[in-house]
Amino acid sequence: MRWLPAVVAGAAASLPVASLAFAQAIPERPEELRFAPSVFEPPRISGLRFELGNGLPVYVVADRGLPLVDIVLVLPVGDRDEEPGEEGLASMTAAMARRGGAGDLGPEALDDEIDALGARIESRSSWARTVLVLDSGSEALDRGLELLASVVFEPRFDEERLAQARENLRVSLLARADDPRSVLDREWLRLVHGPESPRSRQLTEGSVAALERDALARFHRRHWRPEGAVIAASGDVEVEELVARLDELFGGWSAPSPEADRKTEVSAEEVSAEEEATDGASDVGAASPGWWIIDRPGAQAAVAIGHRGAVFDSWDHPDRWALMLLTELLDGPGTVSRLRSRLQLEEGLTYRVLTYFDLDVAPVAPAAVGPPGRSTGEFRVFLETAPESAAAAAAVVLEELVRLRRDDVPEAEMATARRSLLSRLPLLFDRAESIAGRYTEDELLGRPHEYWSTYRQRLLAVSAVDVRRAARRFLDTGGVALLVVGDGNAVRGGGGFEELRRALGPPRAVDR
Amino acid sequence: MRFAGWLMAAALLASTTPSAVGASTPLLEPSHFALDNGMTFLVVERPGRPLVAAVWAVRSGSAADPPGQRGLAHVVEHLLYAGSRTIGTRDWATEAPLLARWERLYEQSVRRGRAAAGLERLERRLLELQRPGAYAGVYTRAGVLGVDALTGHDATFFQTLVPKEKIELWFWMESDRLLEPVFRGFRRELAVVEQERRQRIDSSPAGTWFELFDAAYWGAGHPYAHSPGGERFEVAGLLPADARRHFAAFYRPDRLVAVLVGDLSPGRARQLAERYFGRLGRVGGRDGEVGKLPEPQQPELGSLDGHCACRSQVEIRYPTVPFAAGDDAIALDVLAGLLNSRSGRLHRELVVGQGRVAWAASAEHVSRRLGGYFSVRIEAGEGVELEELEAAWDRLLAKLRRGGVDDAELGRVHRQLVTDSWRQVEQDAGLAQRLAAAEVLGGWRQLKEWLHAAGEVNGADLRRVIDRYFLAAERAVLALTRSGTADQ
């Protein structure tokens, strides 16, 4: 049954054989191949957006290719809405809404029903979002939607399951130093945003113990509200039928407690008012700049270097586009980018580098969280390498940042980075689920849909001068934090140490 | 560029079986043809897609590593990104003799354990002639995405996402590196492979133990006893000539499979395939000259106890059947489904039930070309001893033997397997990978036929495989006890 030898040769005849009478010569080099121009146009938004009775927006993209449906409800709620001492509350509320039973169904009965449909319902939260996903076969959609609504509106937060989850969380607190990467992630946020920033808050034994049923129910009542929520639907659906059904289930949803205070409006990444910024952009220096080290034995060192992300007052801000290109130049996928060429191809120092630069737009102010004018996002270059190469690798990164501030990028390199960025555009819209997801994200971020139709034009307009200007403004080489988690002696004895010490000062131990 | 993810490849192959889709979808009815040289092509035409998911695979992986050269298949996978006589060089005519000289010096250096005179100078000279990253550069400039490769135990995969207008570039590039690859930058690539190993194995709290357990379970000398990442010291001793020998033996057109999913007609695909891949030599030579894949052999079932800075846990393994072994394999796949998921037996009885002992638990049926096993992994709850985990599993198994499985439970598992299968092929890249993996291991048709067969598995089948394979005397156990954290 599972072994079907030699099926291929016999089946070959089933295809029309293309004529080879005009067999073309193969060009010497790939650059000689000529292609039809490929200009990707993002799919139009018209006809995809609906509103339920209460104004809740729904994006629906039908695709009948497979009998699968995805329904995603996104609420603009997350860790950022926790008060000090409530660390973990948003995530636990999201997790237990699914795992602790809902409506008439206890936890086991709910699991049984969902699994019997062959469906999945998951609920989780992050810094600024809570996401509930129903993923089901189309024939099970109707019941799946009822269960999803039940999870959203009537979670039971079963005491016993909650106690187990609390216990698991407490144990994982004890084990969180096991993985050097998670150690780095945690301490890095404190260095970049400062110990007082909500981004740096960590679970504690106390905050875990406080995750009781009442606290979850209160958080749910207060923050799981229709305002700002969006639904994305995709897959094998009858559009009108689905919208009608969603309206029955979610169209009457209204906030139970008007006093509930959501801290911010629509911006995905929490940002605050820009008190002094005059050029429509924020400051980026790390809260604790310099070189930091967490001494820890191991074959591999984890390295992060960077500072805060940038915040702009408009999606059109030219520096924002320039920074997108700059990030691509530095570490776009493919080995043509600068960090990969140097760290991987030339020096073989690392298996991979990961760079990201949060470029947020905050049209809405003010917010109560974080120091003024500062992003809660990051610019970060992360890599892993042998401890004795850690300083050398970090020095290469720093050197490349300095170079971007100092020299204009050659036009050929600019062109490659533009093409490379543009080439990923289709991937953002490659199937129904991503199209619905993309437009839902627009709604949540307050990003105009036209952003996508002008994307190409805007990227093509970025010049080397723009990149250098943005680098000088937003790559704060004097304000970077460098954190190395690894064997301190090996790091100090390795190559690049002196060079790095001169640039950033001697490494200091992180006070944990 | 993300090079090899060989651990992922293991998971990809392991999950090949449950990736079947109902007969209703045309997605699993690829057009298929073979070139005269034996290379197989599968094409799924999906009009309107901006990108074509293009994957090719070779029917051999780390199981083909010769003794003393564990990791060779993975190194060759990396080296295939170094280019060809056209790509990756500024001047092949000048580079070629220097490269040959460098190889001689490098061989001497490895044999003597110290760098031969002039090696580094020559390396620097070569670097001036070479263009590291040129292969990826051509793709990046053309907007090709997702360039990646995976070395598994039984197969090696090379994948990309290509703008549909530029699909001919893929044919050019991939046939070029298969036709006349040049393994330049050898020493640098070994360094990257070493970094990959540190990152994937050494930096993971239990990574080394999982590797050691594989070695103990299969037994010394078994083709699956080492991970595709290989053995550090053996990798360091590899020479370019070893890599070329491996390439010549195994990357023959009759061992190659290509899968294309996207807006590309089968007719056009065939035309391009014949023009470009038709260049690869027909299979010649006698058996002695080509790569021989190892024959199946029984695992040794070695067990292992250890400590690590990880959650205390056990993995219990039972030997089962190789990939091509018929109905038992499918029943074992369904059994894994019955144990997994929130309503599954493991979660119910070990993780959340009254007598719960575990933080997490999962089951997996792994069937490879040369052998298979059923694995149950249980991570201990706070304060729970490892013996209790094994005892809890034994109780669960006894209950399953005694009480069997009712229709409602089996129906639930069937429905979950069906939708899971659809999910796995929802993305074109996923479909392409799974078709390639299926074709390499046993024929692409098993993707859809598996589901039909899985739907027919009944309680008696489950009882049969439990009785046949879940024998206390024939199991191996990895038991890891938490030893505290590295920096505490």
Image (spheres, coloured by chain):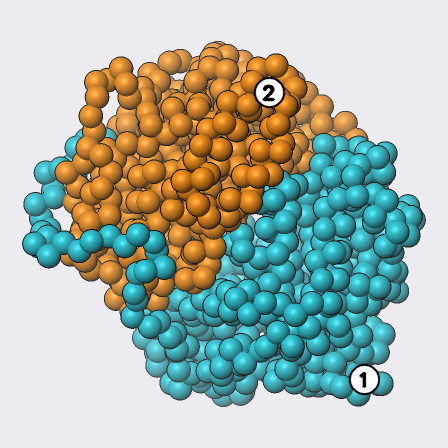
Q: Amino acid at mark 2?
A: Ser
Q: Is residue A207 visible?
A: no
Q: Amino acid at mark 1?
A: Ala
Q: Dividing the picture into quarters, in which one does residue B211 lie?
A: top right
Find residue B9 and report its horizontal and vertical position in percent: 45, 38
State the residue at coordinates (76%, 86%): A279
What letter labels the chain drawn in orange? B
In the rendered image, the vertical position of residue B360 relative to residue A399, given as above or below: above
Residue A288 is tagged as none
Q: Is residue B125 visible?
A: yes
Direction from residue B441 to residue A340 in the image, left or right: right
In the rendered image, the vertical position of residue A502 relative to residue A437, given as above or below: above
Callout 1: residue from which chain?
A
Callout 2: residue from which chain?
B
State the residue at coordinates (29%, 70%): A36
Find residue A248 and report its horizontal and vertical position in percent: 45, 80
Per the model, the C-alpha gap separating discs 2 and 1 is: 60 Å
Direction from residue A302 to residue A43 in the image, left or right: left
Q: Dividing the picture into quarters, in which one does residue A12 lie?
A: top left
Q: Which residue is mark 1?
A: A277
Residue B109 is tagged as 2
Find residue A213 and report its horizontal and vertical position in percent: 73, 60
Q: Secondary structure at mark 1?
A: loop
State the residue at coordinates (35%, 81%): A240
